[in-house]
Amino acid sequence: MRIRLVTVWILCGLTAIAAGCTSYYRVTDPASGKSYYTTEISEAGRAGAVKIKDAKSGGTITLQSSEVKEISEDEYKAGISAKTPPPK
């Protein structure tokens, strides 16, 4: 029983450490000026293209040209909760 308790506490500690290691990014498309918020960025296989999962819409987006900036958790939360203006 004691080994189980120690194992549970170790797993809880590792989970807390892993949760605190998240990086937040604002990815901007220079052509449209639209910003996307994500915690993961991957290469899309083409020169300079990035593939992200937009936290606001939940969609996967590939951008040929982008500006990536690491931001704070507060900026990330504010960005995903901001209202998007209607399209023109």
Image (tube, rainbow, N blue to C red):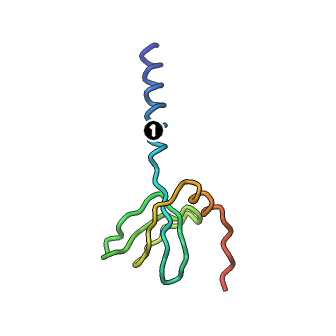
* Residue, disc 1: 17
Q: Give the image location of residue 33, x and y in percent.
A: 54, 79
Q: Residue at x 66, y 82 (%)?
A: 87
Please name whichever residue, 54 or 66, is drawn nearer the observer in this view of the structure: 66
Determine the residue positioned at 44% across, 30% down: 11
The furthest residue to the bottom:
88
Element on which disc 1 rests: helix
Q: Name the residue at 48% across, 69% down.
A: 27
- At 47% from the left edge and 57% from the top edge, which residue is drawn? 39
Residue type marked 1: Ile
Q: Is residue 25 above or below residue 32?
A: above
Question: Could you say where residue 81 lies in the image, as x and y percent from the top left?
Answer: 65, 61
Percent position of residue 15, x then y: 46, 37
- Left or right of residue 53, residue 74 in this image: right
Q: Quadrant of the C terminus?
A: bottom right
User: Vertically, is 66 above or below 72?
Assistant: below
